[in-house]
Image (spheres, helix red, strand yellow):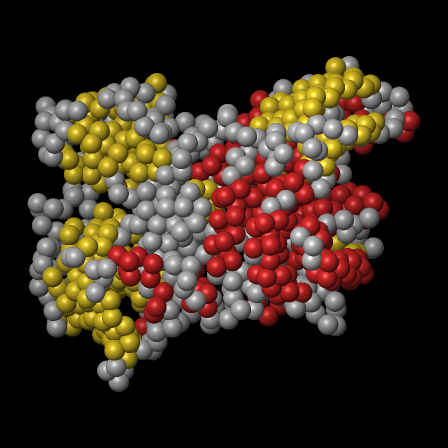
Amino acid sequence: MKTAFIPALLSSFNAQYFALGRSLQKPNTPYHGFVLTPDSPYATLDYGAEVAGFPTLEITNIDGPTQIEVKYSEQLSGLAEPFSDGPSLFVASLANSFRVETFNITSAGNLSSKLLQGGPTLAKYSLAYSEHGRNSISSSVGAVDTDNLPGSFHSSNKLYNEIWSLGARAVSLSCFDAGSQKPTMEVSAQGSKVSSSLPNYSSLTYNFTEYDMEFDAKIARGGFIWSVGYNFGIRSSGGILINLAGKYPEETTYVNTNKTLFPPSTITLAHGVSFVNQTTLTSYKLASFKVPFDLEESLWHRISTSVRSNHLAVSVNQTQLFNVSLSSYYVGGSSISTSGAFGFGAWQDQSAYIRGVYARDTTGNMIYHNSMTNAALVLPEYGQHENYFPTCVDGAKRDRLAWLGDFLHTTRIIGVTTNRSDHITGTFKLLLSGQLSSGQLPMAPSLGYSPDIAPKTFAVSGIAYLLPDYQILALISFVSYMEHTNDTAFACEHWIAWKAAVQWLAEYRDESTGLIDFSQFGNAFLGPSSGSAVNAASIEAFKGMASVASAIGDASSANKWATIYKSLQATLNAHLWSEEYGVYSIQESQPGNFSISALGFAITSGSANATQINLALSKLHSLKLGPGYRDSSLVASSDLDANLSPNTNGFLLPALLQQKQAAPAKFLLNNLWGAMVSNDTTKSGSTWEYVNQKSQPGYGQFTSLSHPWGGAATYALTNYVAGIRPVSFGYKSWIVEPAYAGFGLDEVSATVPTPHGPLSVAWTVRSSVVTVTIDAPAGTTGKLVLSQGWACQGEFASQNCDKIKDFVHEIQSGGLHHFTHSVRA
């Protein structure tokens, strides 16, 4: 019987538990080396939390040639799926697009994957042919230790401590240094080798329409993909995908190769982001054609593709394989566009070399040529250069793009956890490099494209980006960064660009209504394009940017933007506040409907008065759904498939805490964020993208379980429960206002990093006596506030509540300060 022994490994991320047997099992045995045999062909490893990096197999003994299939997943159930919890095919992102990888092992030793796995929590090893090795994850994000960060939070509630760590780990895995994310495309004198990656698209061909393309291809294993008609501005529509499968020679073909999806010596046509529906984006497999000869591996083949409006034809070695009318295929009622970029990739475990790419227009003029042998030219053009900037992406495993609007929560989490300002400024530099001449910032730039490429390449019709309200959230994100750091040098360096971004937003104020109106874009993320959420968030953006302008001495901009936000506040309350219903109407035409985003921003922007806040909050209970609040009253409470968004609930949570609303805030913390730590089979140690009504991942296997946009609870706990917040930029002045009641907490301690040094607070509550110790950095001033608002609810509610006063103490210097105060009247 053949066996393989796998010892424990010393690496950045090591397995904590494992299970060994004839089927998938939950790992519960402390990890140690193991042997795979035909009687125990499966090993399941649990790393204890989300990790990221390059897998390595270490084999100490092997009895013969071995193939090992390794599956990676954030949740245990993904390991039972054919594609695990992937593939992640929205965009190529300097990572393996697949969550299944096969290794061919011929001798003992280490075998490392060249393809990054962005966010597994578990791995499953399957003995495919002989015996098997073991995996470690060499970190691509540096050291991850949420117990030893510049920022910290600890309380007497273990759940809250775990919730705080979720956001800290999410940013630790989704933010990384420049040059840390490596190309999946290998460029050499042979050509460009593509492996297990969604097509990487040429930025020079973004506006191609009708043309003839030729290139040489040599299959290294299995086959490869090329694609045409890809629109960078609307990436969710994907492109026209073409997979060419080889003859599958026994000596190079893995035994787990999917020959049903791609039969030997066939060419398969699809439209969308994939050949299979494994995501929330529908794809269509259109047709499969037999190649009339054996398509040999390790030989060069000349591929010709004729692209015309509504027509596509492909030939291999001058033999036509198909010539089709695209209108004959059903793709959900829409038409198939052939306009856009072309690119090259490979399906799971496929690999091939591409070289000598030419394209000619319909008159025969050469419009494109790339030998594909010069890495300095190929990688930046095809988005395969290692990341140019320190960057924060949307999720560790999926959506590895710098999403403009989602960065708001990420910025605030970093400010109270890792303090990696370079990750924030690097992301801003990436975003600013894609700014259009209009001032609009890119919705979601990829990592590997050169920042010197004209931004119009990635815009819709070269003139605009989608999700216009993401610009608003980006401006608020920059304001939050300034609040934490007072980085006036960075602000001044890029001030022209930031001013253009604010001006772009101001130009969308409708002359007749006075509201910000994005209706020409069709839709917005926060809600109706001229609705209350868009406008309340805009007020916060203008107000915050006015403060930034003042900080760097641009009085003209400060005055201009202050005038805008004050005017917009009046307009919001005149047009979108409904006296009849006591809510901010989701839009003027729907006065009875309201949203949590609008309510959150109306409060945090200072737009709502006390009466409006109290009325609106009294209606909040009607939006309760499962473990959280539905986005708006337009989401039917009877919709069992409706997901809850930690992102939008994250706009609400700070507003609730600001208003001393312990009950709904506690509900969200205990339930929506509590769902992320309550189940060992879905727990990733990071914050989730969506949560369903059963407290499970909202999109099933597709859900990102390491998504910083879901991490608002982390900074909310620091800012409002521990109570540490900046009053002036960079914590030159600060406030400590503990939430000492309503959450059942006996003690809390927290530290925030500031430009002046750490600012720490520790408080305890014993029989209505609050004891607070503050350790403030030199050169700063602040105040302690024990608010009457907290004393009048929860476990401290008192019949004499109206007689209790705020306790306020001004602190005029750094150093250690100690206070004891009874909150009883």
Q: Is residue 272 above or below residue 117?
A: below
Horizontal arrangement in the rendering, residue 40 relative to residue 144 (left or right): left
Residue 778 appears in view:
yes
* Residue 284 at x, y percent in the picture: 34, 61
Vertical position of residue 43 compared to residue 369: above or below: above
Residue 551 point in image, percent of width and height: 69, 50
Considering depth in this image, is 682 or 519 the residue closer to the camera?
519
Q: Is residue 122 left or right of residue 64?
A: right
In this view of the protein, which residue sits in the foreground, 507 or 26? Answer: 507
Residue found farthest to the bottom: 363
Q: Quadrant of the C terminus?
A: top right
Q: Nearer the viewer, residue 816 or 764?
A: 816
Residue farthest along the right direction in this orientation: 803
Residue 656 image offset from top left, x and y in percent: 71, 39
Residue at the top extreme of this rendering:
767
- Residue 129 pos. (x, y %): 14, 35
Residue at (29%, 44%) from the top-left corner? Answer: 115
Please tell me how many numbered marks the rendered image carries: 0
- From the viewer's perspective, is residue 172 above or below residue 147? below
Q: Residue shown at 67%/52% (left/top)?
A: 552
Name the residue rendered at 45%, 56% in the picture: 445
Q: Residue at x 34, y 26 (%)?
A: 15
Q: Quick one: quadrant of the N terminus?
A: top left
Residue 480 sits in which quadrant? Answer: top right
Is residue 232 in view? no
